[in-house]
Image (cartoon, rainbow, N blue to C red):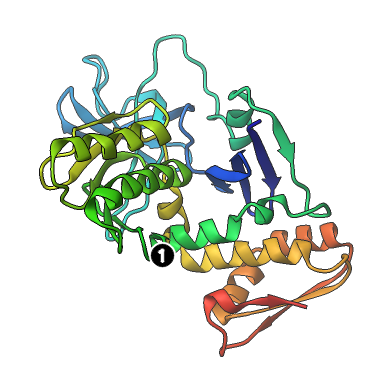
Amino acid sequence: MAEWLYEEGIGEARAALIEKGRIVEALIEREGEAARAGAILQGRLVQTIIPRKRGVVRLISGEEVLIEPIPPKVAEGANVLVEIFREAIAEEGRGKRAKGRIAQPGSKVHPGPSLLQRLRASDIAIRPCPAHEEDRLEAHGWSELMEEAVTGEVGAEDAALRIFLTPAMILIDIDGSLPPAQLGPKGAKLSAQAIRRMGLAGSVGIDLPTMNNKDERIVAAAQIDKYLPLPFERTAVNGFGFVQIIRRRDRANLMELLREDPVLTAALALLRRAERHGTGGAATITAAPAIIDLLHKRADWIEQLARRRGGEVTLRADSALSLAAGHVA
């Protein structure tokens, strides 16, 4: 039976949907004031990009939201309520603003649902995973999945994926030692599983190997339909082995989230390990200077860790360590 594993970590909450002993979906929600999908928030129309079609609203928090359309009676400078339907997404060079629409008359301000609230709405059982109990996320391959999301590399020698994030779409390249008739279906299956596991959404292109005939391409496409739950739309696999998938995009995917700030990602992973180190009590975190600098700035996280461990937490910088090489003693 499927169940969500949910962990209220320091600085972020984590969840994994487990089916048949494997992580099939993974979600992370980090602390912050950014607008969540589903929120209705107050702001002011500060820019009209295309009259009556597109503009920018600055929320009370200072975050800017791209809105479409602009109702006829709403002029630049007007105070408005905005319904958020896509959260802001970090991208290399320039991030994408959150997207929204002017809320319906009579709407009231409210935040978007948290990760835990979204899980509760799924009607799937939720198992809390406190730090003093068995590390159930790790037992199901959490660290391996995080590594896949950071590197974009999934699979083995016989069939492997390389996942590339671009501003226009996500591209998945498939390679391996299997013959094309076998590599096509295997690569399609791995791609569908990775898309679901990492929350890849928007436009996703999969470059399957060139297969010999239409029947082989149909078999490969069937693997996508089998392993990627609806809703989504896709094209047929063309003669060159390319297939495009469209999924609704509400927030950043796992790859975008982990890559946005490598120092923050490494620091939060280290805090997770520190929560579980030994049997509690005092602990020393040794890490790269950039991580230690961040943790010094977030004294609230260190205080929270000390309370959970029941002992003092000491921070020590070591310039010889890479971001991933921090440790707890």
The quadrant where residue 132 appears:
bottom right
Quadrant into which the C terminus falls: bottom right
Q: Is residue 145 left or right of residue 210?
A: right
- Type of amino acid under label 1: Thr
Q: Secondary structure at mark 1?
A: helix
Question: What residue appears at the point 45 percent right and 47 percent down from the top-left corner?
Answer: 198
Given residues 83 and 311, the one toward you in this image is 311
Given residues 155 and 146, the one toward you in this image is 155
Given residues 128 and 167, the one toward you in this image is 128
Percent across and percent down for residue 138 are 66, 56
Residue density around tag 1, few if under 14, some if 14–19, many if 20 or more, within 10 Å: some
Percent across and percent down for residue 33 are 53, 44
Question: What residue appears at the point 60 percent right and 67 percent down from the top-left corner?
Answer: 267
Percent across and percent down for residue 147 are 50, 63
Percent across and percent down for residue 238 are 13, 40
Residue found at the far left of this picture: 239
With respect to residue 35, does 261 lie above or below?
Answer: below
Given residues 321 and 187, the one toward you in this image is 187
With respect to residue 97, does 111 lie above or below?
Answer: above
Counting the numbered discs, the total is 1
Residue where numbered disc 1 is placed: 151
With respect to residue 314, does 98 lie above or below?
Answer: above
Quadrant into which the N terminus falls: top right
- Judge whether residue 299 can be spotted in this image: no
Question: What residue appears at the point 42 percent right and 30 percent down from the top-left corner?
Answer: 229
Question: What residue appears at the point 60 percent right and 55 percent down from the top-left corner?
Answer: 142
Q: Is residue 312 left or right of residue 23?
A: right
The quadrant where residue 277 appears:
bottom right
